[in-house]
Image: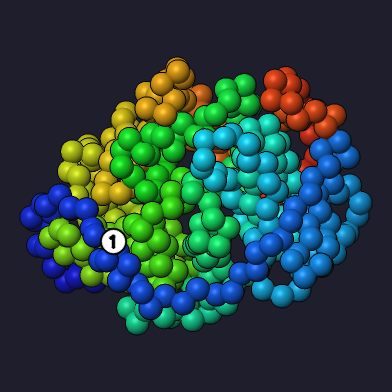
Amino acid sequence: MRAILLLRAILLLGTASAAAALSNATLNSIAADAIWPEVATGCVLRADFLNRVVELQTSTGETRVVLSKDANPATVIPGPPQLCALKNDHDGDGKQRSVLTIATDLKYLRPWSHFLWNKLCYCKREGLDFLLFLGNVDTAHAPNPKCKSGKAGNHWIKAVAIHAALSRAGQDEVLVLDTDAIFRKESFSRHGLASCYFGVMEDAQASVAAGAEHYQVFVNAAVLLVRETPWTRALLRLWWRDRCGEKDQLILWHSLLTLWNQDSNLNYDGELLAYTSRDYKNKSSTSTYKHARRVVTFDYARQIRPAHFVKSPVRREHPIYHLAADRLLDFPDFALLPQTALPSPKRCRAEAALPSLRSNAARRKKGARGAGPASFLAHTKNRPAFDCCPAGNVDAAAPCVAVNLERSTHRKGESTPHR
């Protein structure tokens, strides 16, 4: 491994030239051999906000209770994964815009009911479609021969779900949220913010965007803004085709580097596929996912935009570089939105500055892992202690109310901070 690191250091001495825009023909040829699994569309969601009941009906007529106060409703949906939709779109700007969340099954989803109601309420009040991807796909085999583990976990349904939302459900702009992400209470009183963040992407000529993290990771995929473009389609094909290891973020970084390598001297050739190990007993190991997250990905990415990175003052055997935290960071067709306020984009000129896209709200934590600055979204294991559709009132002007949460039955508990 030391020899590999030395070789990589030599390759990284040069700075990659700025990547030019790839042609549609080139983008369409990238990972063209990716074979997408079957996903059933036509599934309809129905939400009763007064009685707190969500049901779905598949295109074949199967019905299931997604959420209710009744005990132990059925959890299995026969057939392939389902992309279910609650249609609310009435913003009138010609864009099909939605919020997408993803779960392997109803049993997994139900402990996150407060989080799901938060998303459903926001979409209803804002006139956004809500998409729920339910199901699993066979990822036991990792097709890329460079994948050292030779297998992949079930996190790979995210790439499949986003592809289905864009290609099968005809969405133009999709806000992808993990089950443990919520809309902050303040976001319910500022209408149209979701469209504004996509406007920020438009102005930055980005097809995909994420919020900058508070810890050492290049891109956290818990919150993604995705626009339907040829570049996005190429990224998703790579992300699915080269699946490798337990977690999907490693190959998201690999896919970004692979695309940027197309038109630069990045000298990236799938090296991240060797870093799937999550055995951290040897703290000095340089062959783990953690080392790829903290060091390797940053070493490659900073060749594309050196000015976006700041060297850590802490002396280490392998120097660490941090992302600049005070401004939008533009990469080819990709953007990282800062943890600070953003100026309004062209499509939202009447708006005041936008709050940061996301924060990591965590009770009982101080400092950088605490509640964080005002933000549009929070990524947190703590359930929202407010309700913005009280007593079934989904009017956009309805005030949010505080709620008393019953003790959590989730295995990680309601007070566990997300890290």
Which quadrant is the N terminus positioned in? bottom left
Secondary structure under tag 1 reads helix
Answer left or right for 258 relative to 126.
left
Answer left or right for 13 relative to 44.
left
Mark 1 closeness class: few <14, some 14–19, many ≥20 residues within 10 Å: few
Residue 201 visible in image: yes
Give the quarter of the image for residue 127: top right
Q: Nearer the viewer, residue 346 or 65?
A: 346
Question: Which x, y percent locates residue 264?
Answer: 15, 58
Q: Amino acid at mark 1?
A: Asn
Residue found at x 28% / y 41%: 330
Question: Which x, y percent locates residue 388?
Answer: 72, 28
Q: How is the image coloured?
A: rainbow
Residue found at x 39% / y 72%: 242
Point out the residue furthest to the right here: 70
Residue 368 visible in image: no
Question: Which x, y percent locates residue 139?
Answer: 53, 76
Answer left or right for 46 relative to 39.
right
Q: Nearer the viewer, residue 318 or 403?
A: 403
Q: Nearer the viewer, residue 160 or 44?
A: 44
Give the quarter of the image for residue 24: bottom left
Q: How many marks?
A: 1
Above or below for 191 versus 293: above
Name the residue that disc number 1 marks: 24
Question: Which x, y percent locates residue 17?
Answer: 11, 52
Above or below for 122 versus 321: above
Residue found at x 55% / y 29%: 192
Residue found at x 44% / y 38%: 198
Q: Nearer the viewer, residue 5 or 171?
A: 171
Above or below for 274 versus 366: below
